[in-house]
Amino acid sequence: MPAYVVRLFLKTAHDRPMRDVPQVDAVAGRGLSGDVSLGRSSRQVLLVDQTTLAEFGLHPGQIRENITLKGLDLSAIPQGTRIRIGAATLEVTGDCTPCDRLEAIRPGLRGAIRGRRGLLARVHTGGTIRVSDAVIVEPPSAS
């Protein structure tokens, strides 16, 4: 089954609810237009897979991810991997370390979800990403 985008979210401000959107504009080297993390160097986009959310009884957007995916095991994707979604390409910068905010959702969640919190990425090639866009993983080069 091919992987695809299930939901898209923007953080319009810290400690504010996520905004569910049908599409986002990814800006090369900057992040997602309209997102509070726009301009960060490595923590521009957070990707989470729907299977992980379901296993922990969470809803899309609840752990503040920007992109919720289906059909892709993010825990097996190494740093440097490029992920094409719609017209954009993201480059994985590493795992997202669980923060204290997860404890407010449910005590113990921070420790339980460690290693499965999702992947952080930067925008390598800009473009529009839409709900239902296919996801194509490009392994890091061996150079």
Image (cartoon, helix red, strand yellow):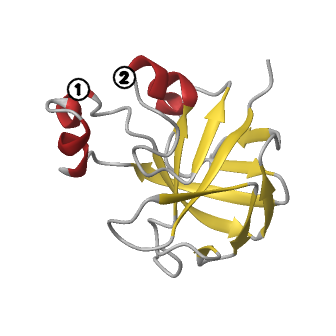
Q: Look at the image and tell me in which quarter the N terminus lies.
A: top right
Q: Is residue 103 left or right of residue 60?
A: left
Query: What residue do we see at 65% from left, 58% from top?
Result: 90
Residue 91 position by quadrant: bottom right
Foreground tag (2 vs 1): 2
Q: Residue furthest bottom?
A: 39
Name the residue carrying label 1. 112
- Residue closest to the eye, 102 or 116: 102
> In screen coordinates, is 86 left or right of 14?
right
SS of the residue under disc 2: loop
Question: CA–CA distance between discs 2 and 1?
Answer: 9 Å
Q: Which mark is residue 56?
A: 2
What percent of the width, then of the height, locates residue 108?
15, 30
Residue 105 at x, y = what percent? 26, 39
Residue at the image point whose x is 68% and y is 67% from the top: 124
The reply to whether discs 2 and 1 touch (Cβ–Cβ < 8 Å) is yes
